[in-house]
Image (cartoon, rainbow, N blue to C red):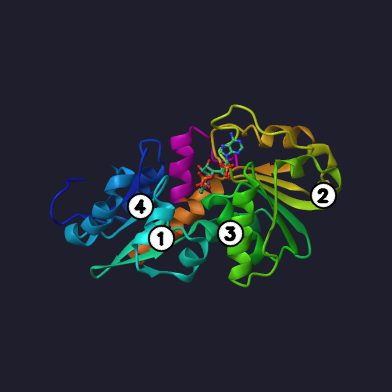
Amino acid sequence: MAINRDIAVAGIFGDPVGHSKSPAMHNAAYAALGMSRTYAAFRVTPGNLAPALRAIPALGIIGVNLTVPHKEAAARLIKDLSGEAGMLGAVNCVVNRRGVLRGDNTDARGLERDLRDLGCELRARLAVVIGAGGGAASSVLACIRLGASRVVIANRTPARAAALARRFSAKGARAAGEPSGLDALMDSELLADARLIINATSMGLTTGRFARLDYDSTPADCLFYDLIYSREPTEFMKPALAAGRHAADGAGMLINQGELAFKLFNRVAPPAGVMRAALFDALGRTLSAR
Ligand code: NAP
C-alpha cells in the first residue's frame, strides 16, 4: 500500500516497541477490511511522551496504543479519561476525537473476556493476582467484575500491593484486594481455595525462573493465567500443566484488548479471528494452540 495523504495512520508508542505484535494485528485487520489505514510503531522515550501526544491531533493520527513505560504517565497527561482509565490510573489507548484526546484502557476488558472464554467462573471464589503494576491493576478489576469474593494481591514489594488495594477500596470496589508479599504463594491453606492465579509480573521472562509457588496445594479447577505470552508455555505455566491444572497465557488478553482498541480507533470491529491469526503467525504458533 502506498503511504500518501489519503492514508489515515494509527499506531503504538513505547520504549522499547520493536517487539510489539500490535502492528501485525491491526494491519491484518485493515487489510481484511480493505481500509486505507495503516498502524505504525513509534519509539517514544519517556521524555518525549508529552510532545508525542500533542502531535497526535497536529498530525491527524486517529489513535495510538501505549505500552511500557507510558501507560501511567499518560493517565496524568491526558485530561479526558474514561472511568476505567481513571480507576486503573493507566491509559493503553488514546483516541483522537476531532482534535481532543480521550484516554481509555482496554486491558481489563480484554482479560475479563478471555477469562470468560476460558470458562473461569469466579463467583464466591478466591483469585490471587501476583504483581502490583498496571497489568496487576487490570487483573484485579477483571476479577472483581467476574464476581470474585476475595482478591489477594501478592507482590515482591508489599507496599505497592497495599497501594493498589487502597486504590480499589477508595473507588468503593467490592472485594477490593488484600495485599501480601510473595510468601502468599507458599501458603497452602490460602492456595487450596484459589480458583484463579494470575501472573502480572515479568517474572519468568526477565528472570528465567518463576518464584516459588505451591502448585500442588491448589484445587483441581484452579486456572493459572500468565499475562506474558510466547510461542511455548511460560515458566509460570509449566509446573501448573505438570500438576494437571489448566493454564493459559496472555495471548487471548492481547487479542481482545487489540480488538477493542481497533473498534475505538476506527468505529468498526475487526473481522473475527483476523487479529488472532496475525498474532499467532507473528509468534510462530499454530492456530489450534490456545
Ligand atoms: P509493571 O507495571 O512494570 O509491574 C511489574 C511487576 O512485576 C511489579 O509488580 C514488580 O514488582 C514485578 N516484578 C518485576 N520483576 C520482578 C522480580 N524479579 N521478582 C518479583 N517481582 C518482579 O509491569 P506491567 O505493565 O504490569 O506488566 C507486567 C507483565 O504483564 C509484563 O510482562 C507485560 O508484558 C504483561 N502484560 C501483558 C498484557 C497482555 O495483553 N497480555 C497486558 C499488560 C501487561 P515490584 O513492585 O516489587 O517491583
Say which element carries label 2: helix
Asked whether the residues under the numbered discs 1 and 4 touch, taking CB atoms below 8 Å apart as contact, a structural biologist would say no
Residue bearing the label numbered 1: 75
Q: Give the mark toward the camera: 1 or 4.
A: 1
Give the quarter of the figure containing the N terminus: top left
Q: Quadrant of the C terminus?
A: top right
Query: Residues under labels 4 and 2: Cα distance?
Result: 47 Å
Q: Earlier in the sequence, mark 3 or mark 1?
A: 1
Q: Which amino acid does label 1 sit on?
A: Ala
Any mark on residue 190, and which?
2
Label 1 neighbour load within 10 Å: few <14, some 14-19, many 20+: many
| Foreground label between 2 and 3 | 2
Q: Which of 44 and 115 is in front in this view?
A: 44
**In the image, the residue with mark 3 has its CB under 8 Å from the nearest atom of ligand 1:** no
Magenta part of the protein: which range? Answer: 274-290
In whole angstroms, how far apart are the C-alphas of marks 4 and 3? 23 Å
Few, some or many residues within 10 Å of mark 3 (<14, 14–19, 20+) = some
Going 56% across and 40% down the picture, which residue do you hit?
A: 228
Query: Badges 4 and 2: C-beta atoms under 8 Å apart?
Result: no
Residues at marks 3 and 1, CA–CA distance in whole angstroms:
23 Å
Nearer to us of marks 3 and 1 is 1
Marker disc for residue 32: 4
Q: Name the residue carrying label 3.
A: 113
Give the structural element (helix, strand or loop) at label 4: helix
Residue extending farthest to the left is 5
